[in-house]
Image: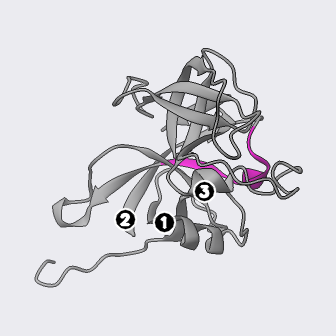
Amino acid sequence: MKQAKVIGRVFCSRQCCGMEAKTMLLIQPLDWETDKPVGEPLVAGDTVGAGAGENVFFVASREAIAAFEGWEGETATGTPLPPVDAAIVGIIDGKKFN
Amino acid sequence: MFIAKVIGNVWATRKHPGLKNATMLIVKAVDPMDNNKLVGEATLALDGNQGAGVGDTVLIVDEGGSARKILKNPKAPVRTVIAGIVDTVHITGKE
């Protein structure tokens, strides 16, 4: 799981299966130790209600779909799972290095 | 799987319900062939009930299916998990 900063939001009027009513945020991955940007910004599905400027952590690849799977009625009602490859799963309050 | 060292910890109040009660640690891979020198990029790993802490050398699983099995949670959105605490690594031909 990687750290990232929320730098924007993506709106789509036409969306594919399961993407309806999902918040898509534009995030810039950061290095854990230096907080410097690493790589290109990417779009991730939000599961925690993150907002602009917040430091978050996200999970990539297949596990991103698991973040939307059957939690708090999220897609438990039989709606299709969203085809995402990155999901924000937490807002960072703080971190400490020794 | 790879060997890594725990270099820090992270706390978060707002997180996915699948990560509830999980200890989140920042780990960095080490090279056992080169005096356990830290290599690569730091990453966030969940502690799979091993009780690891900062400074420990740990065994990391970086694959979703196995990670969920270790956490005993079939729906957790997790990929990187601490599967064990490394005591020693023996390399043939090295003392």
Find out whether the residues at labels 2 and 3 contact each other: C-beta distance under 8 Å.
Answer: no
Query: Which residue has dot 2 on it?
Result: B3
N-term-proximal mark, 1 vs 3: 1
Query: Which chain does the numbered disc 2 sit on?
Result: B
Task: Report crowding for label 2: few under 14, some 14 to 19, many 20 or more residues within 10 A (C-alpha).
Answer: many
**Label 1, label 2: how many angstroms apart (C-alpha)?**
14 Å
Looking at the image, residue A94 lies above or below residue B44:
above
Query: Which chain does the numbered disc 1 sit on?
Result: B
The magenta region covers B15-26
On the picture, is B10 further left or further right than B57?
Answer: right
Query: Which residue has dot 3 on it?
Result: B78
N-term-proximal mark, 2 vs 3: 2
Give me the disc on residue B63. Answer: 1
Task: Report crowding for label 3: few under 14, some 14 to 19, many 20 or more residues within 10 A (C-alpha).
Answer: many
Any part of residue B14 in sight:
yes
Q: Give the residue drawn at x 88%, y 56%.
A: A77
Secondary structure state at the residue bearing disc 1: loop
Whether discs 2 and 3 lie on one chain: the answer is yes
Question: Residue A63 is drawn in which quadrant?
Answer: bottom right
Give whichever of A60, B39 is nearer the camera.
A60
Secondary structure state at the residue bearing disc 3: loop
Find out whether the residues at labels 1 and 2 contact each other: C-beta distance under 8 Å.
Answer: no
Question: Residue B4 is drawn in which quadrant?
Answer: bottom left
Any part of residue B21 in sight:
no
Give whichever of B85, A93 is nearer the camera.
A93
Secondary structure state at the residue bearing disc 2: strand
Mark in front: 2 vs 3: 3
Residue B75 percent across, percent down from the top left: 72, 63
Q: Give the residue drawn at x 63%, y 24%.
A: A12
**Label 2, label 3: how many angstroms apart (C-alpha)?**
18 Å
Q: Amino acid at mark 2?
A: Ile
Whether discs 1 and 3 lie on one chain: the answer is yes
